[in-house]
Image (cartoon, rainbow, N blue to C red):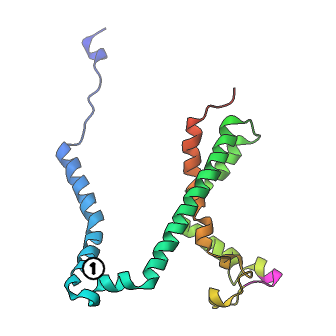
């Protein structure tokens, strides 16, 4: 064999400086909005109780929002862990029928953006819902969720966001767990 046949083709790499420049540009564009908010919040801190930071931190709704966010993320993480582990176990260690269709259906929420899912739930359970109108429990057009009885529309049962936010993470957790389990046989 000739010397030409044994040589690997040369792979062209982008210059290292260009990669660092792009990395710095992306980091800068990602951090600038947060830095602007931080500077705005700390700009008038010397005014004491009249500063914007103090007003936000002393407002009760700030702490309610923080509590709700921690509750939602904690509950979502726990539910994702439980459902993802159960699904990974069922797919990796058992011989269930129609395994590919189950994987497809379970991974489907990762393919649909959360905004589209939220809009479809609102259409299904909102004021114009054919299903809820036929059952007589649809909320009125333009009504606020607080004026609707708790048991009326499924969109008003507690917080739909809290209840369904975990579903977006379950498939990715399941895929990670499934890769660690051995298949049957």
Q: Which quarter of the rendering shows the N terminus?
A: top left
**Residue 123 % position (x, y):** 66, 76
For residue 166, above or below residue 58? above
**Residue 38 % position (x, y):** 27, 74
Q: Is residue 162 left or right of residue 131?
A: left
For residue 8, above or below residue 19? above
At label 1, counting other C-alpha atoms closer than 10 Å, the crowd grade (few under 14, some 14-19, many 20 or more) is some
- Check disc 1 and report its element: helix, strand or loop: helix
Judged from this view, the residue extending furthest toward the left is: 17
Quarter-wise, where is residue 99 in the image?
top right
**Residue 129 % position (x, y):** 72, 79
Quarter-wise, where is residue 32 in the image?
bottom left
Q: Is residue 24 left or right of residue 93?
A: left
For residue 27, above or below residue 17? below
Residue located beneath label 1 in the image:
41
What are the residue bounds of the magenta stretch?
133-138
Q: Is residue 20 left or right of residue 115?
A: left
Q: Name which residue lies at 74% across and 80% down.
A: 151
Quarter-wise, where is residue 59 in the image?
bottom left
Q: Is residue 26 left or right of residue 136?
A: left
Judged from this view, the residue extending furthest toward the top is: 1
In depth, the one of 152 and 96 nearer the eye is 152
Q: Which quarter of the rendering shows the C terminus?
A: top right
Residue 118: in sight, yes or no?
Answer: no
Q: Name which residue lies at 26% across and 16% down.
A: 4
Q: Name which residue lies at 59% across and 52% down.
A: 81
Residue 130: in sight, yes or no?
Answer: yes
**Residue 79 % position (x, y):** 61, 57
Q: Name which residue lies at 53% across and 62% down.
A: 74
For residue 95, above or below residue 60? above
């Amino acid at each position: 064999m000739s010397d030409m046949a044994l040589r690997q083709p040369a792979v062209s790499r982008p210059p290292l400086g260009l990669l660092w420049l792009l990395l710095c540009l992306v980091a800068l564009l990602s951090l600038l909005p947060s830095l602007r908010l931080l500077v705005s919040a700390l700009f008038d801190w010397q005014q004491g109780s009249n500063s914007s930071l103090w007003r936000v931190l002393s407002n009760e709704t700030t702490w309610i929002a923080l509590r709700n966010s921690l509750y939602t993320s904690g509950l979502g993480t726990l539910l994702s862990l439980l459902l993802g582990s159960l699904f990974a176990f069922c797919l990796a260690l058992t011989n269930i029928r129609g395994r590919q269709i189950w994987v497809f259906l379970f991974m489907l929420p990762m393919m649909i953006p959360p905004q589209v899912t939220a809009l479809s739930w609102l259409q299904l359970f909102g004021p114009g819902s054919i299903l809820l109108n036929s059952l007589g429990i649809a909320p009125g057009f333009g009504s606020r969720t607080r004026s609707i009885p708790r048991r009326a529309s499924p969109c008003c049962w507690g917080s739909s966001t809290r209840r369904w936010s975990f579903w977006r993470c379950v498939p990715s957790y399941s895929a990670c767990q499934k890769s660690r389990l051995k298949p049957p046989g």
